[in-house]
Structures are given as structure tokens and as C-alpha cells.
Amino acid sequence: MYDIIIIGGGASALFLAANITDTRVLLLEKTAQVGNKLRITGGGMCNLTNCDEPDRFLMHFGSPQQRTFLKPALMNLSPAATQVWFTERGVPLTVREDGKVFPRSLDARTVISMLKDQAQQNGVEITCDAQVTEVCVQDQIFTVRTAARSYQSLQVVIATGGMSYPATGSDGSGYALARSLGHTIIEPTQALTSLVIKDYGLSELSGNSIRDSHITCFHEHEQRRYLQADGDLLFTHKGLSGPVILNSSRHIRTGDLITASLFPSQGGETAREEMHRALLKDPKKQVSTILKSYGLIGRLIEHLLDQLQLSRDVRCAELSKKDRTALVQLLAAYPFTVSRKGYFSSSMVTAGGVSLAEVQRTTMGSRIVPGLFLAGEVLDIDGDTGGYNLQAAFSTAKLIADHFSRTLVTR
């Protein structure tokens, strides 16, 4: 009989195991090793957290409900406290100018090794190649079954992650376990993912970006915008990526129209007015010269001029009012129609998961099944890129660990 069984071997599961002491704990990981998804986060460098203060940090999550839900966990283990926690355990950190925090080694394996060692020092048993097929509870005792054997415990934590990067073991199996125990699953969708664009004509720009682009999003057949955002926009071989797309992707659907400024702007009429003035100010200059001064690369300028059937050496004075208006419209709000999101195999996180209404935000305990807890991405929480999701995984896990340290009575 175990006091706690942790299902999963990712960020939240390992952090929980690293923070539980004096308790009989078993961690079950379905793959051959723990930390698979953690190993590839931040391009393998492991963006652990961000330097934002808690209130500002919470604004990087997808909805007011998520922010309210996460606040107790984040106040219990803030980004600053997380940095101290890792530093005190032998993982020196480095902070970039944009506030992102990494291990100084810039190697996720440093983090995984420390978490695993800390868990084992705490006496946690780690069993890999142990996919959980069923969890049931009777008389306040949980039975957790794998293909090889069954285990019993007083408490169970589902920390299996979402559906992103399923090759790492994050394949959505935790949703089925939670559903079997009575929980509602908010339909999972890809988040922090790139977009494939219909009839995309900018493949030759792949790898180039627009700094501080302003995007506006419209659902198919709707004229009212549902989202505006600013950030760097990256052209890919099949569509769009970059922070402004990744952070907005949780809301985007197939068929949506996205308009994007092709130069740094504040969006809307401000962008149009700025570009109109620039094209009228120096009539003798070539249009391409003006656009290059705004950071547009030559191939993009050529694409725009070709699209409007204008000469590539056309001067500002030679633009008709109609052509100038059309060019400004493309520059301020270039239209893209979404063919689909990137697949889960290339999405950084999952939006959706176990309904937050069914989980106690002060303990991460189930409101439906006493003794059941949920941590990390299996919950319906998803944040922006930049260390926000890992921090959420750590904070929700730490809240559970602290709850256990106060309340757990062993048998």
C-alpha cells in the first residue's frame, strides 16, 4: 500500500516527487524514461519560468477563469521562489533580457537529472514502462492498474500532461483516466502552435519575420473581430508562426481570417495613416526604398508589388491613389485564411483538459473523488510561450505537495 501514486513522469510529476518527503510514493511513467517532454522544451534548453510578478504572469493565460484558478498555486510558488528552489538544489540559472529563465547549462537534462535525483533521495519509487490502464476507488482506497500489475494507494495524482508531442508520452491518456473517475474534459485543442495557411504564397519567405506585427482575427463568415494581438510574426514554409501566432493559436479555428501588419505597428488606422504619410512624404523615392526603411525584406516587397501589378522600381509619385490605398491595405492588414493548426505532434501545449470547475484551486484536489489530485497540463490551463506553462506545472505540483505535507495520514 502506497500513500501516494503519481501517474506521469513529466514536469509536474517530477516536481511533485521532488517535493514530497517522509511518505511512501510511487511514480508510474508509461515510457522508458522520465522527463521526455521536459527534455525538448525551450529548444532543449528548458525555459523554466519567467521573471514576471505573479499578477502580470497570470495575464499570460488563456482566460479569466484560468487566471483565477492558478492564482493560489502561483502565490504559493511564485516565479521568484521557483528560481530560488532550483538554485538551492544545485541548478544555477541564467535570466535573459526578455525575462525568460533557463538553467545556466542551457541543457534540459540538467533539470531532469536534479529532479529525478531529488525524488529518489526523498524515497520515491520510479517505475518506467508502466502505462496505467485503469484507476478505480473503493472504500477510499485507489487501485491503479498497469499491464504488468496493480498497485494500491490512499491518494492518486494524475500528472500525465496533455496531448502535445505525443511521442514523448503526452498523448492524452490522462484525460481518459480522469473521465473514468467522473471528471468532465474540455475538448483539447492545439495551443502554442503554428498555422497552415490556405493558398499560401509566401513560402520563399520561410525563416524571415516581421517585428511587432499587429494581427486581427475573425471567425469564418463573421465580420466582428474576436482577437487582436501584437508580437513577432514568423513566415514558415506552409504558413505562419512566431510568438504572436503561437500565443493566439489557442483561440484560432480552421477557416478563420487573420490580417497581419507587415511592418512594426500599433495596428488599425494608426498603421494605415503612418504608411500613407510615408509614401506621400518623399514622392521621388522608390516605393521599395520606403518599405525597406520599415524593415521589409526585398522578396516581400517584390511579392507585394507583383500582387498589385506594379513595377518593382515604381516611385511614390507614380502611385495612383487607388494603388497607394491598396498597397497600404496589404501592408497594414495582409489577409491570411487558416487551413488548419499545426498537429498535436508539433504543438507545444494543449488547450482544454480537466474542467477547472471540478478541481479545488487551493489544493488541486478533485471535487468529485476525494483523494484524487490533478497537476499540470492535464488541467484546462494553457499559457503563452516564455516559461509560463512550466511554471504552472511546478506551482500546481508544489501546491499538492504542500497539502500532503500538512494533511496526509499514512496507514
Image (cartoon, rainbow, N blue to C red):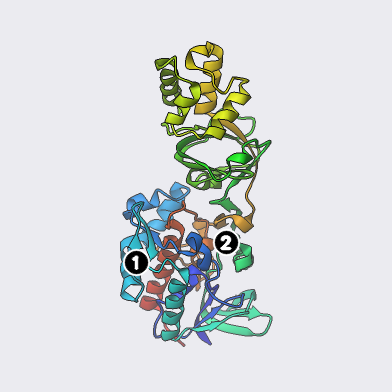
Residue 312 at x, y = what percent? 57, 23
Q: In the figure, 77 relative to 342: above or below? A: below
Q: Residue at 49% x, 33% y: name it.
A: 296
Identify the mark nearer the N-term, 2 or 1: 1
Q: Residue at x 37, y 67 (%)?
A: 104
Q: Residue drawn at (42%, 52%), measured in percent from left and top?
A: 67
Distance CA(mark 2)–CA(mark 1):
27 Å
Q: Nearer the viewer, residue 115 or 73?
A: 115
Q: Is residue 259 visible?
A: no
Callout 1 environment at 10 Å: few (<14), some (14 to 19), or many (20+)? some
What is the quadrant of residue 131 in the picture?
Answer: bottom right
Q: Is residue 396 left or right of residue 310?
A: left
Is 316 placed above or below 248 here?
Answer: above
**255 or 325: nearer the eye?**
325
Q: Quadrant of residue 115?
A: bottom left
* Above or below for 44 versus 382: below
- Image coordinates of residue 229 in percent, x first then y, are 46, 38
User: What secondary structure is marked by label 1?
Assistant: strand
Q: Does residue 188 sit above or below 27 in this rendering?
A: above
Locate residue 185, reporting x and y percent: 60, 57
Tell me which amino acid carries mark 1: Leu
From the viewer's perspective, tell me whether residue 240 is left or right of residue 80.
Answer: right
Residue type at the position of mark 2: Gly
Q: Left or right: where does residue 188 sit relative to residue 271?
A: right
Q: Which mark is residue 348?
A: none
Residue 337, quarter of the rendered image: top right
- Where does residue 279 sit, x and y in percent of width and height? 45, 19
Query: What residue is shown with label 2?
Result: 162
Provide the residue designation for mark 1.
93
